[in-house]
Image (cartoon, rainbow, N blue to C red):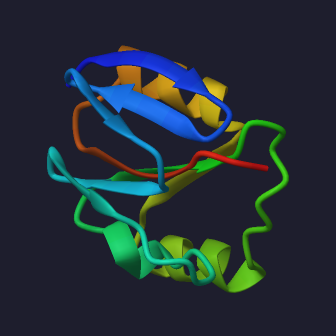
Amino acid sequence: MRFDKFSFGSIRIDGSTYEHDVIIDRGEIRRRKKNPARSSESSSASQLVIGSGAYGRLPVMQKVEREAGGHKIKLLVLPTIDAVEVLKRDPKDTNAILHVTC
């Protein structure tokens, strides 16, 4: 998976631009519905990266941390630009929820 560009309001992955939040689950990209992030949205991997927006303002509920821990999923919550860097370096067995605004 190739991450070409991220800016406030959009992200470019594998040559396609998404102007909405995305979920990456086993290499498949799909639109994230606007509701609180849940680890079960993308939990088939051993690591879940949540991109918390351009300014890192997306709140992640404590329930997400508990749920991830209960499923033995390593959870990383980072501003989206940093989350993308993690995905570039360590994509194996990693799923993601990427927020493109705030």
Q: Relative to the observer, which residue lies in front, 2 or 8?
A: 8
Q: Is residue 101 above or below residue 36?
A: above
Number of on-image labels: 0
Task: Give the residue displayed 74% in from the left and 78% down from the top.
Answer: 61
Task: Give the residue displayed 48% in from the left and 54% down from the top.
Answer: 20
For this view, does 27 lie left or right of residue 5?
left
Q: Quadrant of the N terminus?
A: top left
Q: Is residue 79 above or below residue 60?
A: above
For this view, does 61 lie left or right of residue 1?
right
- Quarter of the figure with residue 75: bottom right
Q: Is residue 89 above or below residue 65?
A: above
For this view, does 4 lie left or right of residue 54?
left
Residue 56: percent from left, percent from top:
81, 44
For this view, does 27 lie left or right of residue 94?
left
- Quarter of the figure with residue 69: bottom right
Residue 5: percent from left, percent from top:
47, 17
Q: Relative to the observer, which residue lies in front, 35 or 82?
A: 35
Q: Relative to the observer, which residue lies in front, 78 or 80?
A: 80
Residue 64: percent from left, percent from top:
61, 77
Task: Give the residue displayed 52% in from the left and 37% down from the top.
Answer: 10
Residue 22: percent from left, percent from top:
40, 54
Q: Relative to the observer, which residue lies in front, 26 or 36?
A: 36
